[in-house]
């Protein structure tokens, strides 16, 4: 049940690139979370791209666009190694989509939010990480 959200200034990405980013970001998230590539898990991985007004997301130093990626996963879903891999790949995904280079990496922030056990619900019930792990193992099985 992961979710990834990209916030960026309007107009930085073309419509085609923005549409492709939905698939790219969710695929990256599922890969680093270790979820199986199945219809069920792809349907549960949500992506949201929010654009703020042009010039509305910059630093105090310059007017260059900034990018914020918020990733929400169940607590325990990502080891430190997986977090590092996710951060590195998501940063590269965003830089590539925006036509920027590695030197612009500090303009991309990736914030990982681990949802504590018992605080994530869907379909009217609490979703437990152990249940998700069991479903993933069954899908790989």
Image (cartoon, grey):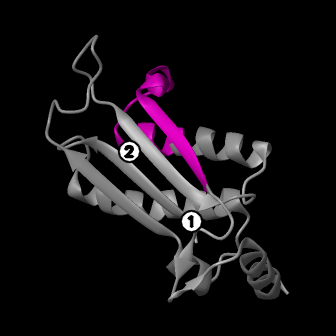
Q: Are marks 2 and 1 in contact (CB under 8 Å)?
A: no
Please give the name of the residue rendered at 42% of the width and 63% of the height, measured from the top-left corner: 47
Q: 46 or 37: nearer the eye?
A: 46
Q: Which residues are magenta?
A: 91-114
Q: What residue is shown with label 2?
A: 97
Please give the name of the residue rendered at 60% of the width and 41% of the height, measured from the top-left corner: 87
Q: What residue is shown with label 1?
A: 2
| 49 relative to 83, above or below | below
Residue 13 belongs to the span the image colors magenta: no
Please give the name of the residue rendered at 44% of the width and 33% of the height, measured from the top-left corner: 108
Which quarter of the rendered picture does the C terminus lie within? Answer: bottom right
Horizontal placement of 83 versus 141: left or right?
left
Q: 68 or 122: nearer the eye?
A: 122
The Cα atoms of the two marked residues, 2 and 1, are separated by 22 Å
Name the spot of residue 104 as percent of width and height, x first.
43, 23
What element does badge 1 sit on?
loop
**Front: mark 2 or 1:** 1
Name the spot of residue 10 as percent of width and height, x first.
18, 44
Residue 111 belongs to the span the image colors magenta: yes
Name the spot of residue 129 as percent of width and height, x first.
72, 72
Q: Residue furthest top?
A: 61
| 126 relative to 13, above or below | below
């Amino acid at each position: 049940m992961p979710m990834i959200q990209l916030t960026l200034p309007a107009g930085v990405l073309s419509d085609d690139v923005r549409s492709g980013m939905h698939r790219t970001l969710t695929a990256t998230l599922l890969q680093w979370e270790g979820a199986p590539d199945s219809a069920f898990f792809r349907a549960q991985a949500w992506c949201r791209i929010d654009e703020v007004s042009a010039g509305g997301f910059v630093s105090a130093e310059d007017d260059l666009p900034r990018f914020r990626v918020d990733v929400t996963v169940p607590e325990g879903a990502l080891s430190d190694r997986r977090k590092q891999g996710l951060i590195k790949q998501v940063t590269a995904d965003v830089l590539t989509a925006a036509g920027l280079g590695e030197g612009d990496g500090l303009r991309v922030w990736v914030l990982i939010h681990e949802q504590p056990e018992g605080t994530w619900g869907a379909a009217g019930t609490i979703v437990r990480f152990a249940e998700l792990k069991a479903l993933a193992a069954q899908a790989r099985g």
